[in-house]
Amino acid sequence: MDAIAEATAQPVIEVERDGVHYTLLGTAHVSKASVAAVKAAIDSGRYDAVAVELDAQRHKALTQPDTMAELDLVKVIREKKVAPFAANLALAAYQRRLAEQLGIEPGAELKAAAVEAVAQGLSMQLIDRDVGITFRRILQGLGWWDRAKLIASIGTGLFDREDVSEDDIERLKEGDMLESSFGEFARDTPTLYAALIDERDQYMAAKLRERSDGATRVLAVVGAGHLKGMAKYLAEEQRTPQALTTALTQVKAKRNIPWITLTLMTLICAGIAWGYWHGGKDLGRDLLLQWVLWTSGMAGLGALLARGHVLSILTAAVAAPLKPFRPGLPPGMFSALAEVHLRKPAYPDFLALRDDAQSVKGWYRNRVSRVVLVFILSNLGSAIGVWVSGASIIGRLLH
C-alpha cells in the first residue's frame, strides 16, 4: 500500500475480500495532481478492472458534454421531475464556478479514470448511486422547514458570484462534490449528511462486491472523503450487495391522496357554499370571486415574474382556480407545458444551459431554464393565492 500511495501521491486503502483485492484510491475533485495520479495508477498494469465514483447520469454529463441537448423537457414536466432537474442545474452551475476559478473541471479525475480504463481495455464500473435518488432520499428525510432551508441554500449558492472560499476548496479536496454543493447546510444537518455520504459509502462498497466480471484486482477511484467509510463497509458489511443496494435506492412513494391540500380545498369550498346558503347570493358570489381573483392573480403574477409567454401567464391564471378539481396537478405544470410549446427551446439553449445557470440573467435568457422558472413561480404564486384567499374567506365568514 505504501508503494502505491507514494507513487500516486494520494491516500490509498487496500481491502481483500472474497478473493478480490480492492485498492481504494482517494482523490480530490479539484486537483490536477489527482488526474495525473489516476492515469498513472491505471497505466501501471496492476489492475484488471476500474470502478469510478460516478452514476450513469454524471458519467454521461462528464464524457458527453452535449448530452443535455437530448433532454426531453416535456417528459421532465409531465413526470414531475422539475425539482431534481433544477437541483442538477444548481450543481452544474457550482461546478462551472469552480472550474473557472481553479482552471480544472470538478470531477476531472473521475472522467480521466472512466476514459483511461476504456482506453486500456479494462473493465469499467460506475458505482455511485443515481444523483436523482440521492436527492429524493434527502428530501424524504427532511421536515418542511429543513426542506425550505435546503432550497434556500441551493438558490443562494446558485447565484452567488463570489469566488469559492479557500476553506470550501480545502473541504472539497478532502470531501465530496455533492456535499460541498449543499454548502454549510449539509455540514449542520445529520439527516442530509447520512444520505449524501454514509449511504453512498455503503452503496458503493456494495456495488464493488457485486461485480460479475471475474476481476480479482480492482482499482476504485473515489473522493478522499469516502475512503474510510467505504473501506469499513467493504470489509465488514455482512448483508448481501443486492439487498443493500435495493434498500438504499428505495424512495418512499408520495401519498396518492394529498390530504393537506384536499382538507384546505374542502374547507374553502365549504366556506363558499356556506356563504351562499346563509349569506345569500351576494356573499357567496363575493367569496367565490375572492378565491378566483387571488389564486388566478397570484399564479399569473408568478408566471409573469418568470417572464413567461403571455399565453403561459394566461394558462397559469386559468389553471390555478381549478386546483380543487385536480389536486395532484399543479398549475405550474400547465403553464410550463404551455411555455415549452410556445417558446420551444432550441439546440443552442441546451448547450448554453450550464453557463446560463450561473446567473439570474442567464436563467431568464435561456429558454430551458425559463421553463423551470415558469413552473416554480407559477406554483409558488398559486400556493400564496390559496392561503391568502382562504384566510380572507374565513375572515369574512367570521364577521
Image (tube, rainbow, N blue to C red):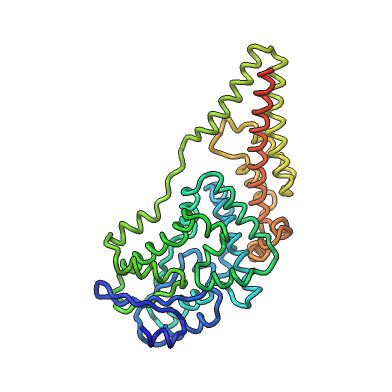
242 or 177, nearer to the observer: 177
Left or right: 37, with 376 as reference point: left
Q: Quadrant of residue 388?
A: top right
Q: Residue 259 at x, y = what percent?
A: 50, 33
Residue at horizontal 57 percent and vertical 52 percent from the top = 150
The answer to which quarter of the image holds residue 378 is top right
Question: Residue 62 location, x and y as percent?
Answer: 54, 70
Work out whether residue 197 or residue 280 is closer to the camera in this orientation and state it. 197
Which residue is at 64% across, 28% downward?
A: 390
Q: Quadrant of the N terminus?
A: bottom left
Q: Residue furthest left?
A: 19
Q: In the rendering, at what x and y percent does residue 374 appear?
A: 67, 48
The residue under the point 54% across, 75% down is 108
Report the number of numbered marks. Answer: 0
> Looking at the rendering, in which quadrant would you find the C terminus?
top right
**Horizontal arrangement in the rendering, residue 359 relative to residue 167 (left or right):** right
Q: Report the residue at 46% width, 52% height from top.
A: 137
Residue 238 to residue 140: above or below: below
The answer to whether 136 appears left or right of 349 in the picture is left
284 relative to 181, above or below:
above
Q: Would you place residue 197 above or below residue 39 in this image?
A: above
Where does the image place residue 49, in percent across and percent down from the top left?
36, 77
